[in-house]
């Protein structure tokens, strides 16, 4: 399997190094999900074999270029963040009842919820075993990241408290559920490449803001892209009543303005969307609403803030590549 970077880089030497190291990460991933037990092996390989952009390990490898990116620990750290991400996908798909992931049936559709959840746990265990070899600081960072991932999912599940702003609540969910691991991906790369603490802090801040922007862009993609590109059924979040920024912005508008069309669209989203035609109609209606453009504007603005975090870094190919990485995450079709 050939693994290539998911961003266009102006420096061919940097691109070649990242491609080579991503291939090493891919090998490590496949080794890490191998089990003697046949069921565990099949289920754990399911999402690895389905592919993916490997954005988190790519970010780890990229920030490592600010130091000595050739260190073995950097590849190990990149493997850890992708194993952790894959583990969360098994759990998320159960929580969201998502039928597809990366164009293939979700694990819970193939083996059932219990096997999918336990497979996610197995991947967390393999990530923990790998991170243990990176030392106690890495273990503490991984544990704190895992805690935030769980809190993000918990708060998404229970929703905002009475009187809490749903949009602010959702942004905090995104910070914990998505941005925490993106930030750790950036942090691990600089950390294990031997960068100074101030450089590690800089790229961690970059990853934190970019992670929220990335998920807001996903909210737009869920409504505007062809499911054959994303590998997910458009509107799955609407069907499963999982909040997204466009829907939250629409509800805020409907609660404060007098436009009957907004209230009618909210009623459409609240109706039974189990029928595919009803879901498609709701997706089409929301897709054409200005809240989708507003969500994209928020994603772009946050990505710009993330890029501003990079100002202390020296100018050159690596900083340019990090800017390109930010642009690519919010300006994509899948």
Image: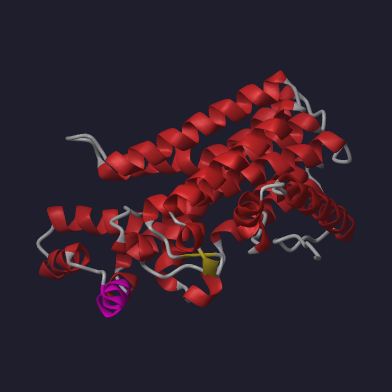
Magenta residue check for 238? no
Left of 119 or right of it: where is 232? left
Q: Position of residue 238 (x, y in %)?
A: 31, 62
The reply to whether residue 174 is in sight is: yes
Q: Which residue occupies the foreground of this view, 51 or 290?
A: 51
Q: Quadrant of residue 308?
A: top right
Q: Is residue 66 above or below residue 133?
A: below
Point out the image quarter for the N terminus.
Answer: bottom right
How was this image coloured? secondary structure
Point out the image quarter for the C terminus.
Answer: bottom right
Q: Is residue 264 above or below residue 12?
A: below
Magenta residue check for 279? yes
Q: Quadrant of residue 253?
A: bottom left
Left of 322 or right of it: where is 156? left
Q: Position of residue 42 (x, y in %)?
A: 64, 57
Left of 57 or right of it: where is 103? left
Residue at point 85%, 40% (across, down): 69
Q: Is residue 325 above or below residue 171?
A: below
Q: Residue furthest bottom?
A: 277
Q: Residue furthest top?
A: 136
Q: Position of residue 12 (x, y in %)?
A: 87, 61
Q: Quadrant of residue 184?
A: top right
Q: Which residue occupies the foreground of this view, 112 or 331?
A: 112
Instruction: Assign the magenta stretch its main secondary structure.
Output: helix
Residue at point 67%, 62% (across, down): 49
Residue at point 40%, 41% (across, down): 153
Q: Report the span colored magenta.
A: 275-283
The reply to whether residue 313 is in sight is: no
Residue at point 35%, 55% (across, down): 244
Question: What count of labels does the image hold?
Answer: 0
Q: Is residue 136 above or below residue 54?
A: above
């Amino acid at each position: 399997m050939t693994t290539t970077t998911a961003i266009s880089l102006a420096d061919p030497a940097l691109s070649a190094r990242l491609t080579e190291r991503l291939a090493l990460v891919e090998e490590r991933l496949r080794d890490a999900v191998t089990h003697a037990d046949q069921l565990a092996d099949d289920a754990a390989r399911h999402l690895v074999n389905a592919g993916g952009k490997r954005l988190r390990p790519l970010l780890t490898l990229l920030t490592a270029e600010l130091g000595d990116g050739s260190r073995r620990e950097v590849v190990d750290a990149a493997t850890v963040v992708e194993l952790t991400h894959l583990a969360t996908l098994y759990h998320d798909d159960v929580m969201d009842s998502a039928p597809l992931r990366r164009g293939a049936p979700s694990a819970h559709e193939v083996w059932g919820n219990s096997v999918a959840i336990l497979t996610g746990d197995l991947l967390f265990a393999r990530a923990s075993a790998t991170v243990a070899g990176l030392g106690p600081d890495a273990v503490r960072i991984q544990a704190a990241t895992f805690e935030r991932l769980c809190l993000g999912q918990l708060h998404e599940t229970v929703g905002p408290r009475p009187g809490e702003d749903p949009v602010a609540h959702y942004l905090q969910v995104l910070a914990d559920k998505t941005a925490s691991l993106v930030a750790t991906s950036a942090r691990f790369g600089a950390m294990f490449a031997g960068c100074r603490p101030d450089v590690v802090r800089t790229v961690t801040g970059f990853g934190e803001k970019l992670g929220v922007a990335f998920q807001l862009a996903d909210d737009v993609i869920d409504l505007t892209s062809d499911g054959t590109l994303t590998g997910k059924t458009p509107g799955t979040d609407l069907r499963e009543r999982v909040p997204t920024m466009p829907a939250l912005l629409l509800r805020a508008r409907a609660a404060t303005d007098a436009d009957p069309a907004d209230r009618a669209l909210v009623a459409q989203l609240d109706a039974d969307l189990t029928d595919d035609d009803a879901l498609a109609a709701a997706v089409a209606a929301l897709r054409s609403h200005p809240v989708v453009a507003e969500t994209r504007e928020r994603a772009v603005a946050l990505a710009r803030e993330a890029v501003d975090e990079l100002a202390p870094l020296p100018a050159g190919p690596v900083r340019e590549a990090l800017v390109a990485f930010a642009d690519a995450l919010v300006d994509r079709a899948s």
